[in-house]
Image: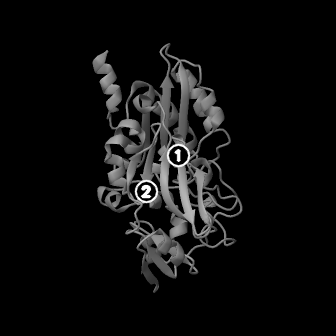
Amino acid sequence: MRPFDYVAAADADGALAAIGRDSARFVAGGTNLLDLMKEDVMRPAALIDINRVALGGIESLEGGGLRLGALARNADTAHHPRVRERYPMLSAAILAGASPQIRNMASNGGNLLQRTRCWYFYDTGVPCNKREPGSGCPAIDGLSRGLAILGTSPQCIATHPSDMCVALAALDAVVHVRSAGGERQIAFADFHRLPGDRPDLDTTLGAGELITSIVLPPNRFASNSTYLKVRERQSYAFALVSVAAALEIDADGSIRDARIALGGVAAKPWRKAGAESLLRGCPPRSEAFAAAAEALVEGARGYGPSPEGNDYKIALARRAVVRALEMARDGVLTNTGEYAQRAMTTRAAS
């Protein structure tokens, strides 16, 4: 690890003043940033410790939404009673990621800023456009098994690793940020970037901007939402494909609203409004789910030679979407068989 300066900020103003230094980075839990520094992938000249900044609360908002503090830990967020009651899909997604030890350290804001786990990105002995723009992308013709099939470019086929972000995308979260110039809000759909010709830029954050909170709008998905994660081992593994799915079902049995977000397939959580609109007004049946799945993965392409390639992800994504929507319809919260509390309550009363 290279030498760096360290500043412990007492408040947000102090943090924003310190981040003006060249190559400085905010640090909270450090569960990804410190690994990248140890591997010499990221080389910040200074770390601005923001753990003492008052950004850790979780609070209800007028009208039924929820504000998640950027410094609230992932574990505290997943187990918070209002998160579990109103947004059980988010709780399930967080608990599907990493390990208990990492979730105890990782912050909500840091989760949004995770960098790809592409092995070429981590290996400083090989080219990588995300690490060094213009150097090349050996993953395209190389080991691509875990990499992207959607939203790729000739420059990069890396995937975003977060489980939490897939649920936040499906929930239409809004990211609140602050800089020395003021505050702004970023719709979650606009927060992460696809690679295009600048794969080194992961998000739309401006220089010196600090994530302060993540706001979840109210919804009616709690009883019929799920997080399905397909991975090569049951715990502490990144998703090959994941799905955050939610349905609002009318009294007549038809679908009033639907949300579907895919993880493990692109450089950001993948949503298509057109795929969701196909479900509105339909009965919640597998045929409708299959049509939505087909629309969601339209344009997908695989990379690399078999068996190291990722062509398999296209069919896997289609099937995972159908299965996740079936689980959401039935009130099954995760693929380990856990049920949403509100769904259980509804069944018990019926």
Provide the residue designation for mark 1.
173
The type of residue carrying mark 2 is Asn
Provide the residue designation for mark 2.
108
Tell me the quadrant of the picture where the N terminus can be found.
bottom left
Could you tell me residue 172's position as x and y percent? 55, 42
Vertical placement of 55 versus 12: above or below?
above
Could you tell me residue 129's position as x and y percent? 64, 68
* Image quadrant where residue 55 sits: bottom left
Could you tell me residue 56's position as x and y percent? 38, 58
The type of residue carrying mark 1 is Ala
* Image quadrant where residue 272 sits: top right
Vertical placement of 36 versus 322: above or below?
below
Front residue (pair 19, 204): 19
Q: How far, Cα to Cα, is label 2 from label 1? A: 13 Å
State the residue lying farthest toward the bottom: 3
Residue pictured at 30% horizontal, 25% vertical: 345
Residue 102 is left or right of residue 271, and the answer is: left
